[in-house]
Image (spheres, rainbow, N blue to C red):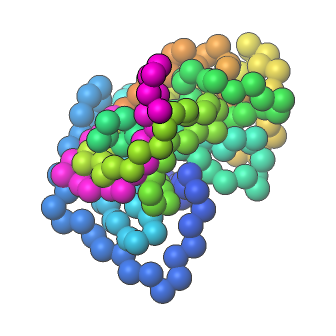
Amino acid sequence: MKTLSLPSIAVVLTLIANGCSRQVESSTITVEKPYPMLRIESFALSDSDARFAYHVDNSFDHDIWVCEDMDGRGGNDVMQNAETAVEGKTLWIRLRFNLQSSLLTYFPIYARYRRLGPGESCSGTIALSLPVESTSPIRKFYGRRVALSADRVILEVGYLTGDLPTMLLETRAKTSRRPTDDPNLAFVPFGWGGLGAEKVAEATLSDVAIPCVARIETKVGEN
């Protein structure tokens, strides 16, 4: 089986110098619906960040295009991003682009998808600065900030099927013409109609304690 190495993904850039990282042995890693194609391979927690190593397998008999980066403005010099959302005591990490947006932007926002042929796989690392907050390159989160400890992580990775570059050309997506010489990469503009067909693989990490900051909507009459 061919393995492709993906770049690391970070919501906030964190440089760790002389820092100590501990492997969390008590965590329970499980793979959940819809397909057993995604797994969280390891989790490490330091004083400054939480790191999740994940692995994606293409067990289908056709190509898939896996979301590896929600890179905001789409420039090569822009930090890679995943969306994080703290809901209750669950930390959601979303590496997919079929999401509702609350932002009005004046620049194209892209996600980068990588082609995996049948039997191919890829790996990546997501690093989140502590405490983890709800943040996204395509929407904002509102509400009162409340510190808590998340005891569960759900990782979502989106993927598309078919000849993605050709589909982008056929639909004449106005902002999809990010130049690339790599036939295994495709840059998908946010809002592209084909994103409605994006499927999501999901994996769960439980029995953890990750410092987070949730956004709690303030009800009428509350201070």
Residue 177 in the image: above or below residue 184: above
* Left or right of residue 121: residue 40: left
**Residue 50 in which image quadrant:** bottom left
Please, which residue is most extreme toward the bottom here?
Answer: 18
Residue 217 in the image: above or below residue 81: above
Looking at this view, is 38 or 144 the one in front? 144
* Left or right of residue 169: residue 205: left
**Residue 108 in which image quadrant:** top right
| Residue 189 in magenta stretch | no
Where in the figure is residue 89, as x and y percent of width and height? 29, 41
Residue occupying the point 45% across, 52% down? 132
Residue occupying the point 37% across, 35% down? 87
Looking at this view, is 186 or 104 the one in front? 104
Looking at this view, is 54 or 150 the one in front? 150
Where in the figure is residue 81, as x and y percent of width and height? 59, 47
The magenta-colored residue range is 202-223
Tell me if I can see residue 88 in this picture: yes
Residue occupying the point 78% across, 47% down? 75
Tell me if I can see residue 112 in this picture: no
Where in the figure is residue 5, as x and y percent of width and height? 50, 57
Where in the figure is residue 187, as x and y percent of width and height? 69, 35
Give the number of marks.
Answer: 0
| Residue 207 in magenta stretch | yes
Residue occupying the point 67% across, 20% down? 191
Residue 50 in the image: above or below residue 164: below
**Residue 22 in which image quadrant:** bottom left
* Left or right of residue 209: residue 175: right
Q: Predominant secondary structure in magenta?
A: strand
